[in-house]
Amino acid sequence: MTNHFRHWPVKVANMIVYLTLLSGSLYSAFGTDHDHGKDSPYDSEHQSYITPAPFTFFVWTAIYVLLGGMVIYQWFSEMVYEVTSWYFIAASVFNGVWLALWTSGHTALALAALFLVMGAVTMIYKRLRFDDGGISTEEDSKLDIIFLHLPFSLYHAWIFVLFVINAFAVLAPIRSDGEPPSTLQVVLSILGLIFVAMSAIGYIESRQGDVAGALVLAWYLFGAFAQQQVPAIHWTALGLGIGVAGYTLKPFVVRVLGGHSGEAAPLLG
């Protein structure tokens, strides 16, 4: 590979926003003081009846590692710039704004910031998966798959999860009086979980298929199962998580049976 120093302002900016976002996330996870009103996505005060267990949020670790590889790989492949352009910078800035708003308790404004993050990440995701034919293992190198396709599959799915979590924290938070949830809250929570599961199926059934994204949603559902103790919500999350995890095997089964052309990377469908 040859070094590519074209578009260096964007590439330098990518590195800066990545390091800033990583630092902010690490501080949120390990440097906050909950005794003085600080809040962290990993151990949040903004709870709803579909909030997952804190361990679920460590999917960020995989995302950050892969994005870290991307900001290095961009110096060796112009494809990174062609796909991400300024969108990764925008997504990182809005993500940082969301984190600041969430930790300061402005959950409604945080939801608006997440909408902007989702828009920027979706533009990258669309370019990768649908423009110019999407993923092709014959044309794209393994490094493209690992440091470009995979991180944004995980990132896109996880931002969707955060959007759902944030929306329910605003619209249907856990009752402050300590009373059990109302029937309406339980029904809305179950519908929210079903929506996530249906979205996971959408990842699998999209034109290119996205197993990695669907697995992120399955991981969330298992996290909700571990956290929520209301029986209807608890067992619904488990059943949907098992169903989604099982459904991610479909592309592999189809390929083995000879019904798939094999153009997509296995992890991505």
Image (tube, rainbow, N blue to C red):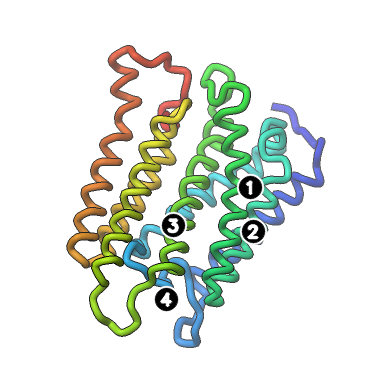
Kindly identify the amino acid type of the residue bearing the numbered disc 3.
Val
> Which image quadrant for residue 227?
bottom left
SS for callout 1 = helix
**What's the distance in space between the residues labelled 2 and 4, CA to CA?**
21 Å
* Circle nearer the viewer, 4 or 3: 3
The local crowd at label 3, few if under 14, some if 14 to 19, many if 20 or more residues have their Cα within 10 Å, is many
Which badge, 4 or 1, comes first in the chain's sequence?
4
Identify the mark at residue 218; answer none if there is no mark. Answer: none
Image point (47%, 26%), residue name = 207
Which badge, 2 or 4, comes first in the chain's sequence?
4
Q: Which residue is mark 4?
A: 45
Kindly identify the amino acid type of the residue bearing the numbered disc 1.
Ala
Image point (34%, 74%), residue name = 174
Which badge, 1 or 2, comes first in the chain's sequence?
2
SS for callout 3 = helix
Look at the picture and state if 260 lies above or below 22.
Answer: above
Q: Which residue is mark 1?
A: 120
**What's the distance in space between the residues labelled 1 and 3, CA to CA?**
17 Å
Label 4 close to label 3 by CB (< 8 Å) = no
Kindly identify the amino acid type of the residue bearing the numbered disc 2.
Phe
Locate residue 208, reporting x and y percent: 47, 26
Q: Which residue is mark 3?
A: 164
The local crowd at label 1, few if under 14, some if 14 to 19, many if 20 or more residues have their Cα within 10 Å, is many
**What's the distance in space between the residues labelled 3 and 2, CA to CA?**
17 Å
SS for callout 4 = loop
Label 1 close to label 2 by CB (< 8 Å) = yes
Image point (46%, 62%), residue name = 167
Q: Is residue 143 visible?
A: no
**What's the distance in space between the residues labelled 4 and 1, CA to CA?**
27 Å
80 or 117, nearer to the observer:
117
